[in-house]
Image: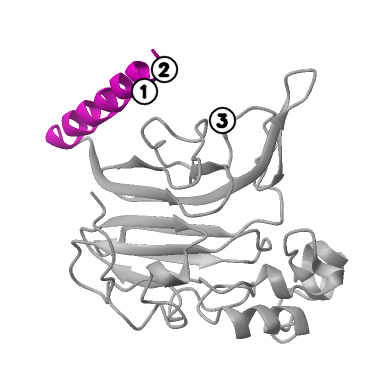
Amino acid sequence: MAETLSLALGLLLVNAAILLFSTGAYSTRLKLANECGYTIWPGIVSGRGKPPVSTPTTSFTLEPGESASIFIPAGPWSGQLWARTLCSYDYTGRFTCLTGDCGTGSAECSSAQTVPLVTVAEFNISGNGGLDLYAVSSSLGYNLGILVVPHGGSGGDCMASGCVSDVEGGCKSETSGACNSTCFAFGARKYCCSGGHTRPDTCKRSPYSLYFKSRCPYVFGYMYADRRNDTRRVACASADYAITFCPHPSRHPVIGHPWLLPFTGPSIM
């Protein structure tokens, strides 16, 4: 019975996707794949003033080895995507996650505010002269690796972005518990770029952000990194994207320098 319901739901989602694309309501597909050895709860939110993505959005789970697709509305869109871990309901019915919690108390995220200790993939679709901009950020901390790979795009460089290194395994004790950012680990203004430290010359990289940079040089971990001109933010046009959580080095030939090599792995379909 459960298998029948699962198959029916899958066919419904496929048919809905075909309808959405045929009517032009949605233009970009994001395929999420879980290569972690544990369950994750994907989170995705649209930027301020941007339309929501299609369902399922953030109230579904991905077991190890599972994948699912979500669809981005046509026209300029921006938003963030991440993975929540160790989620559960308490006795009052409140839903929380150890990492990546979006603070709503439910499985569905409704705001762009995430709780620290989470790796985030950032997208700006068709908002820069028709180009998509995408990058992976550890400015809120790091809970697992994310790899973003474009498929079928043109223009820009259309390269993979993200990190497949085991950053968490080398975290300093002061920033552990997943991997905290220096701002949220210590709360000092010089690390949070606040108060009298709101300029690049007064809010400099910390030893911890330099550690992250050494392990994942093409992941943003510093507030004043130039996201417009920095090569860590990749550009592509008219592409769909495969987002892999906990990308396994043996399955991704882009390990070590994901921004230099075109993707040659499994099809997004």
Residue 94 makes an appearance in the image: yes
Looking at the picture, which amino acid does disc 1 mark? Ser
Pointer 2: what residue? Answer: 2
Residue 148 rendering spot, x and y as whole percentages: 40, 63
Looking at the picture, which amino acid does disc 3 mark? Glu
Label 1, label 3: how far apart the Cα atoms are? 20 Å
Left or right: residue 223 compared with residue 182: left
| SS of the residue under disc 3 | loop
Compare residues 180 and 26 and report the one nearer the observer: 180
- What residue span does the magenta drawing correspond to? 1-24
| SS of the residue under disc 1 | helix
228 in magenta: no
Pointer 1: what residue? Answer: 6
Looking at the picture, which amino acid does disc 2 mark? Ala
Residue lying at 23% horizontally and 31% vertically, measured from the top left = 14
- Point out the image quarter for the N terminus: top left
Comes first in the chain, label 1 or label 3? 1
1 and 2 marks in contact (CB < 8 Å): yes
Residue 189 rendering spot, x and y as whole percentages: 84, 70
